[in-house]
Image (cartoon, coloured by chain):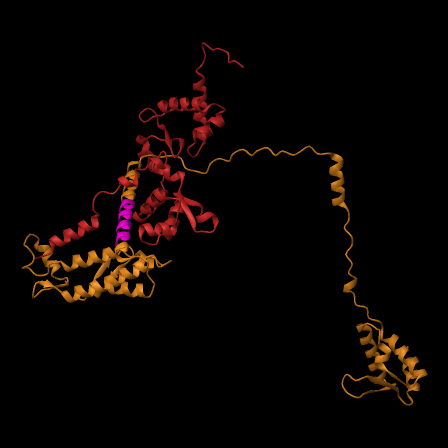
Chain colours: A red, B orange
């Protein structure tokens, strides 16, 4: 069936944009384009066009609400200039006080996950049980089945919340592991510095 | 100063080296949590701390004064490292490292199967991998700082609408048949097997009396063969009752031998009297 030709009309993408805006306000986590298209009853390409429109409208410096692409979907957040005010009213329990051990464990799971606790311990060289439990409680990692299809140890992976907290569009946004880690470790440096200070 | 008194300030432990060793050996402290490199650094820092003014090079006299209070591993008289203390420390730390390494590879002799060169290569590779992970964690920390001013809403997702439940079209008559079968009274459960029937003792009293009217003696077993266990017990009670009233005399040659019952001499009148009394 042919669509009627409309010469003068409200931009139909504009109406779709309003629908998407509404969906994103109700959602409490990032919505993938496919979900938005299904809920709005429209095509993916048009939804992407509408998101472009919304991105222009809800951007830093123009609006207190900012549209961002994060954790595999689209979500609204507060603008950065409102951060101070937000900080007075709201806590950020997920990322507050993450220890070095927790960050290292998070890095292992993010880069090598899904992986088990013994595997993480092997990478970090220390026991990780309590650190893993803490990260699960924060919602940054979650169980992801068991090793070797059921019988093995519980495996963990990072969650969408991890991507959101760290502002990552997806795990692909992490820098490549091979490119990380500069020259010799700082431990050796410290030892050498001490050796030089030693009186002759 | 002894190595054992070396004060440590690690993530997992704070106190003298001696106490750390004790706790580890008693398995009250997981060696895996202990940063052995931290211990080495603490020792080296301590060992190289100047103690006497001639070693201290003038620029920070205040530190020199306070450092002089600290015992050191430097032999002050000869201005040399205390080799005994250093040797002892090396042995202790080597033992700690070996314990820790074994603890980390508990599940199998992974290291035992490797040649020393391979093990060294494996170790170097792991250290390299760990260095990368450490760098990755540093990247994450910086990212966290950079994203500090991003506030967003967190919460459970609203519930998705429930899908409609679809049922196949049903024939009312067929439903009625099914319902009727469910509504039928279940058959009553028989409790017959739970019942115990006790025939009255008097029944056997009468039976034994009439028997003794015809014969002067009889065999108890013979009379009760074919009766149920309960009936036999009641019959025996009747027999005891007759004996008590002196109507019969009982004989048994040995335990479990047949019981012989005989009419007691001159008992008949007493029986009549008893019957009259109890009637």
Quadrant for residue B7, please give it. bottom left
Check residue B237 for magenta coloring.
no
Quadrant for residue B147, please give it. top left
Q: Position of residue A162 (x, y in %)?
A: 37, 40
Quadrant for residue B116, please give it. bottom left
Q: Is residue A156 above or below residue B269?
A: above
- Seen in the image, is B141 located left or right of residue A152? left
Q: Is residue B129 above or below residue B173?
A: below
Q: Position of residue A24 (x, y in %)?
A: 43, 29
Q: Position of residue B132 (x, y in %)?
A: 28, 44
**Residue B266 visible in the current orientation:** yes
Q: Quadrant of the N terminus of chain B?
A: bottom left
**Residue B16 visible in the current orientation:** no
Q: Is residue B94 above or below residue B127?
A: below
Name of the residue lying farthest toward the top: A7
In this rendered view, identify the residue nearer to me: A89 or B58: B58
- Seen in the image, is A35 located left or right of residue A93? right
Name of the residue lying farthest toward the right: B214
Q: Which residues are magenta?
A: B120-134
Q: Quadrant of the C terminus of chain B?
A: bottom right
- Seen in the image, is B46 located left or right of residue B13? left
In this rendered view, identify the residue nearer to me: B193 or B248: B193
């Amino acid at each position: 069936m042919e669509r009627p030709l409309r010469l003068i009309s409200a931009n139909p993408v504009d109406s779709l944009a309003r629908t998407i805006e509404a969906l994103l306000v109700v959602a409490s986590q990032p919505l993938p384009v496919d979900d938005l298209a299904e809920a709005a009853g429209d095509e993916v390409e048009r939804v992407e066009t509408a998101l472009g429109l919304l991105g222009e409208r809800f951007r830093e410096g123009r609006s207190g609400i900012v549209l961002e692409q994060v954790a595999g979907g689209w979500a609204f957040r507060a603008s950065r200039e409102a951060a101070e005010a937000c900080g007075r009213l709201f806590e950020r329990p997920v990322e507050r006080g993450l220890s070095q051990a927790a960050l290292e464990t998070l890095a292992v799971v993010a880069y090598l996950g899904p992986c088990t606790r013994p595997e993480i311990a092997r990478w970090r060289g220390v026991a990780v049980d309590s650190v893993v439990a803490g990260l699960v409680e924060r919602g940054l990692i979650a169980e992801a089945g068991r090793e070797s299809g059921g019988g093995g140890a519980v495996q963990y992976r990072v969650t969408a919340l991890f991507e959101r907290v760290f502002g990552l569009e997806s795990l692909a946004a992490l820098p490549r592991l091979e490119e990380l880690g500069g020259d010799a470790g700082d431990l050796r440096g410290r030892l050498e510095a001490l050796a030089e200070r030693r009186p002759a | 100063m002894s190595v054992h008194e070396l004060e440590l300030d690690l993530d997992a432990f704070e106190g003298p080296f001696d106490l750390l060793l004790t706790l580890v050996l008693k398995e009250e402290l997981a060696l895996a949590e202990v940063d052995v490199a931290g211990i080495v650094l603490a020792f080296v820092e301590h060992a190289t701390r100047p103690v006497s003014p001639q070693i201290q090079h003038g620029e920070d006299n205040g530190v020199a004064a306070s450092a002089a209070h600290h015992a050191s591993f430097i032999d002050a008289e000869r201005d040399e490292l205390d080799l005994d203390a250093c040797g002892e420390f090396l042995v202790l730390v080597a033992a700690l490292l070996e314990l820790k390494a074994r603890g980390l590879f508990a599940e199998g002799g992974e290291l035992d199967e490797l040649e020393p060169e391979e093990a060294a290569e494996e170790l170097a590779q792991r250290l390299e991998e760990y260095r990368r992970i450490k760098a990755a964690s540093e990247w994450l920390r910086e990212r966290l700082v950079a994203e500090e001013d991003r506030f967003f809403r967190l919460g459970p997702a609203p519930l998705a609408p429930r899908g409609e439940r679809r049922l196949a079209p049903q024939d009312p008559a067929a439903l009625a048949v099914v319902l009727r079968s469910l509504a039928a009274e279940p058959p009553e459960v028989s409790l017959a097997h739970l019942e115990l029937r006790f025939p009255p003792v008097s029944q056997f009293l009468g039976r034994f009396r009439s028997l003794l009217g015809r014969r002067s003696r009889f065999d108890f077993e013979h009379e009760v063969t074919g009766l149920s266990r309960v009936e036999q017990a009641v019959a025996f009670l009747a027999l005891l009752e007759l004996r008590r009233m002196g109507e019969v005399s009982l004989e048994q040659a040995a335990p479990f031998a047949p019981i012989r019952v005989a009419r007691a001499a001159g008992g008949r009148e007493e029986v009549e009297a008893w019957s009259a009394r109890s009637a």
